[in-house]
């Protein structure tokens, strides 16, 4: 068993409360991405699991073992750092095999294991080189090889791709995902990059202000955000948020009444919703005066090659709309924004998602 469990973990640095009371369970063999802005506590959570920091209170388990007070070497984990942390005086083979050498693994077995993991990561031809002779992507593969060489109970990765250029990050995302699926190991991956989290992980845990806001599969994080923070943090461009007031047949948003189905309107009244959230891809550009659409004017047009992002100024705020690559509107032009209210999330005054979007079958997703 290599499941990971945080039980009411608190971490304070003096008067600074970095983790408030973290309860988090990562099932065996799953890939969890801890996602959040800088200072949210995600790296501290990882360091506590690794044994590099001690919690102020609470417990941490790997499998059935309480590892809260164990030394890092006794936890059976492997960590890949943002800086790679390779030994410059050692060859690639010596860097990879160092954890086995520390454990006293015989030379023959150690060389065989080094060759095995080097083949998996396609760096067998680099074994006699030193880190300074490698590219960033090759150094990252060596760091990964060193982590997996001893078959740990869990892999911990702290923003391992942040030092790579955009194209290499794209390649390495796929490589790490493929590697973790092949090894079927429990993995906790810390990142501030939502693309990494959504494309690589089985589960995404969104953190903010020392609290776990939501943990769910990537599609649920995107489609069914637990609160306003998750809704606006995940997604690029982020979810559009507009203030609303309740009306007889729906809600007033952007200067127009947005009709809602009776059940949703009743739920909105009970929850006392104050905001509506729409993903840019759930909005479309309509002609001025189009029935049911919100009137506005074009504020910014951003051609992206495969699509065009159109920022529209409405009564109550700006919204982003994903339009086709052939969109030809100009700044200041009067247009309207249309959407299906069934695709909206509705938030109460506490910022919680009180009413979720509805799927194509007309039921709550």
Image: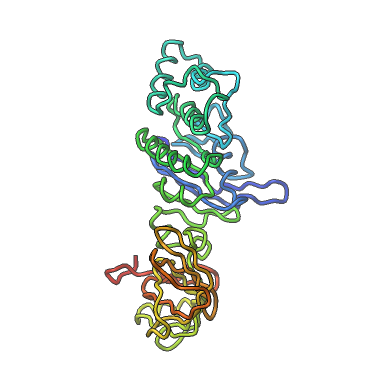
- Quarter holding the C terminus is bottom left
Judged from this view, the residue extending furthest toward the left is 361
Instruction: Name which quarter of the figure residue 70 lies in.
Output: top right
Is residue 64 placed above or below 356 in the rendered structure?
above
- Image x and y of residue 48, in percent: 58, 39
Is residue 93 placed above or below 222 in the rendered structure?
above
Question: 192 or 136: nearer the eye?
Answer: 136
Question: 276 or 325: nearer the eye?
Answer: 325
**What residue is drawn where x is 44% and y is 79%?**
336
What kind of colouring is applied to the model shown? rainbow
**What residue is drawn where x is 39% and y is 35%?**
179
- Quarter holding the N terminus is top left
Judged from this view, the residue extending furthest toward the bottom is 248
**How many numbered markers are drawn?**
0
- Image x and y of residue 33, in percent: 47, 46
**What residue is drawn where x is 51% and y is 21%?**
92
Relative side of 163 to 111, left or right? right
Q: Is residue 210 visible?
A: yes
**What residue is drawn where x is 56% and y is 32%?**
84
Q: Is residue 76 visible?
A: no
- Image x and y of residue 337, in percent: 43, 77
Question: 35 or 141: nearer the eye?
Answer: 141
Relative side of 243 to 153, left or right? right
């Amino acid at each position: 068993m290599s499941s990971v469990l945080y039980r009411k973990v608190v971490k304070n640095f003096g008067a600074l409360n970095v983790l408030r009371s973290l309860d988090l369970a990562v099932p065996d063999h799953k890939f969890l991405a801890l996602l959040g802005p800088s200072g949210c506590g995600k790296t501290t959570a990882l360091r506590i699991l690794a044994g590099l920091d001690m919690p102020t209170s609470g417990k941490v388990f790997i499998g059935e073992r309480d590892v809260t007070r164990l030394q890092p070497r006794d936890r059976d984990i492997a960590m890949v750092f943002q800086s790679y942390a390779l030994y410059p005086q050692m060859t690639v083979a010596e860097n990879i095999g160092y954890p086995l050498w520390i454990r006293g693994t015989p030379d023959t077995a150690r060389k065989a294991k080094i060759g095995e993991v080097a083949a998996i990561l396609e760096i067998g031809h680099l074994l006699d080189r030193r880190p300074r002779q490698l590219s960033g992507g090759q150094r990252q593969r060596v760091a990964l090889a060193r982590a997996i060489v001893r078959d740990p109970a869990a892999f911990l990765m702290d923003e391992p791709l942040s030092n790579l250029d955009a194209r290499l990050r794209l390649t390495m995302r796929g490589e790490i995902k493929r590697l973790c699926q092949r090894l079927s190991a429990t993995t906790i991956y810390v990142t501030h990059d939502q693309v990494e989290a959504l494309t690589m992980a089985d589960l995404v845990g969104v953190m903010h202000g020392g609290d776990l806001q939501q943990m769910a599969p990537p599609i649920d994080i995107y489609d069914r955000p637990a609160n306003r923070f998750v809704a606006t943090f995940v997604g690029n461009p982020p979810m559009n948020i507009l203030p609303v007031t309740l009306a007889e047949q729906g809600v007033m948003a952007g200067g127009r009444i947005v009709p809602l189905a009776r059940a949703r309107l009743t739920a909105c009244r009970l929850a006392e919703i104050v905001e509506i959230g729409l993903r840019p891809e759930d909005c479309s550009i309509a002609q001025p005066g189009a029935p049911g659409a919100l009137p506005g004017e074009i504020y910014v047009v951003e051609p992206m090659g495969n699509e065009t992002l159109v920022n529209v100024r409405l009564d109550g705020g700006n919204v982003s709309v994903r339009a086709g690559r052939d969109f030809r509107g100009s700044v200041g032009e009067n247009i309207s924004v249309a959407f299906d209210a069934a695709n909206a999330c509705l938030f109460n005054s506490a910022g919680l998602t009180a009413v979720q979007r509805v799927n194509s079958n007309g039921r709550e997703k």
